[in-house]
């Protein structure tokens, strides 16, 4: 959690900024103003960034782009970095990318998001985007790891499969042991891929629920509390109670609340409000904290 404030940073909270470390892939979501320095404080190197994902072009979600882009070149980050953002904001991205003079050597590849659907696939799984409802075009993101298989030691032992035969059955899908055929399905079970969703500025809409459906971790804006529910609807934001209801309805495991309005001083109010609807784990994000993905089921 690099920053957890909405438009106005506070003494405790910088504007948005989130780095997801997903095995070997680093995804930087919505870098607001000051993200480069927050990365330093959090111990994150520019070379950890493989993808930059912007939900929309309000300043608190993208004013950190110039600093990050220039830092990628300054540090001579050798791998390509992909940038995903709503296609209607291409001109904003062009300006952010070229905000000042600098010596560009990094390989930054722009991949604007035009519509709902997958935006990238790789070892990390599939990154998909879904349209949200805000005052400007806004997309949320979801990362889904493919399902794998978990070997079952007792079944392997019962079938007499050890050593290189274990690798063989994983590779070929079956193995012959003492003239008997043993299939992979007999000695393993499906290991569900993990999933993550990132939902920023929006009012409740189908996209929110589609992104959050069954995810292990949902990072979601809860700009407001119920006392400002009317205002939230009006300006296209969620309350902590909305976030809790989404998490409950979608079967989320860990709910991470963030993007708080500066008007509130006690972060416990957010978790209490969300907990009224959602019985799972709730984290009220704090700057520079690290939140582990829940263990695999
Ligand atoms: Zn915002």
Image: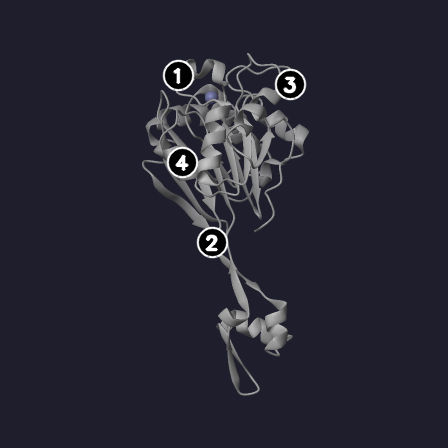
Calculate the distance from the C-alpha at mark 1 to the C-alpha at mark 2.
36 Å
Label 3 and label 4: CA atoms lie apart by 30 Å
The vertical placement of 48 against 269, above or below, is below
Q: Where does residue 146 sit, x and y in percent of width and height?
A: 47, 54
Please state which of the two labelled residues, at mark 1 or mark 4, is closer to the viewer.
4
Name above or below for residue 110 compared with residue 174.
above
Q: Which mark is residue 146?
A: 2
Residue 85 on image: x %, y %: 40, 32
Q: Reading the chain from its start, which is encountered first: label 3 or label 1?
A: 3
Q: Earlier in the sequence, mark 1 or mark 4?
A: 4
Say which quarter of the image contains residue 1. top right
Inter-mark Cα distance, 2 to 3: 37 Å
Q: Is residue 62 visible?
A: no
Q: Which mark is residue 14?
A: none
> Callout 4: helix, strand or loop?
helix
Give the number of the mark in front: 3 or 4: 4
x and y percent of residue 277 in the render? 50, 30
Tell me the SS state at disc 3. loop
Going 58% across and 24% down the picture, which residue do you hit?
272
- How many residues crowd around disc 2 within 10 Å: few (fewer than 14), some, or many (20 or more)? some
Mark 3–mark 4 CB contact (< 8 Å): no
Q: Which numbered circle lies on residue 12?
A: 3
Mark 3 and mark 4 lie on one chain; the one further toward the N terminus is: 3
Q: Which residue is mark 1?
A: 235
């Amino acid at each position: 959690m690099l920053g957890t404030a909405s438009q106005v940073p506070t003494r405790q909270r910088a504007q948005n900024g989130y780095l997801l470390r997903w095995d070997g892939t680093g995804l930087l979501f919505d870098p607001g103003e000051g993200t480069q320095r927050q990365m330093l404080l959090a111990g994150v190197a520019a070379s950890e960034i493989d993808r930059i994902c912007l939900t929309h072009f309000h300043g608190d979600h993208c004013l950190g782009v110039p600093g990050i882009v220039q830092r990628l070149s300054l540090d001579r980050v050798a791998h390509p970095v992909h940038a995903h953002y709503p296609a209607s904001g291409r001109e904003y991205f062009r300006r952010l990318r070229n905000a000042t003079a600098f010596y560009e050597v990094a390989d930054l590849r722009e991949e604007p998001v035009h519509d709902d659907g997958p935006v990238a696939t790789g070892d990390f799984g599939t990154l998909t985007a879904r349209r949200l409802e805000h005052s400007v075009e806004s997309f949320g993101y979801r990362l889904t790891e493919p399902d794998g298989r978990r070997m079952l030691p007792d079944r392997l032992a019962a079938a007499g499969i050890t050593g290189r035969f274990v690798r063989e059955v994983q590779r070929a899908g079956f193995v012959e042991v003492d003239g008997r055929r043993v299939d992979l399905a007999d000695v393993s079970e499906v290991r569900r891929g993990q999933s993550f969703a990132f939902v920023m500025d929006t009012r409740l809409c189908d996209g929110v629920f589609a992104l959050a459906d069954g995810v292990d971790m949902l990072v979601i804006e809860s700009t407001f509390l119920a006392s400002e529910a009317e205002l939230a609807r009006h300006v296209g934001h969620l309350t902590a109670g909305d976030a809790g209801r989404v998490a409950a309805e979608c079967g989320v495991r860990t709910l991470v609340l963030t993007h708080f309005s500066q008007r509130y001083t006690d972060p416990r109010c957010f978790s209490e409000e969300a907990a009224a609807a959602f019985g799972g784990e709730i984290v009220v994000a704090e700057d520079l904290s690290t939140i582990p993905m829940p263990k695999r089921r």
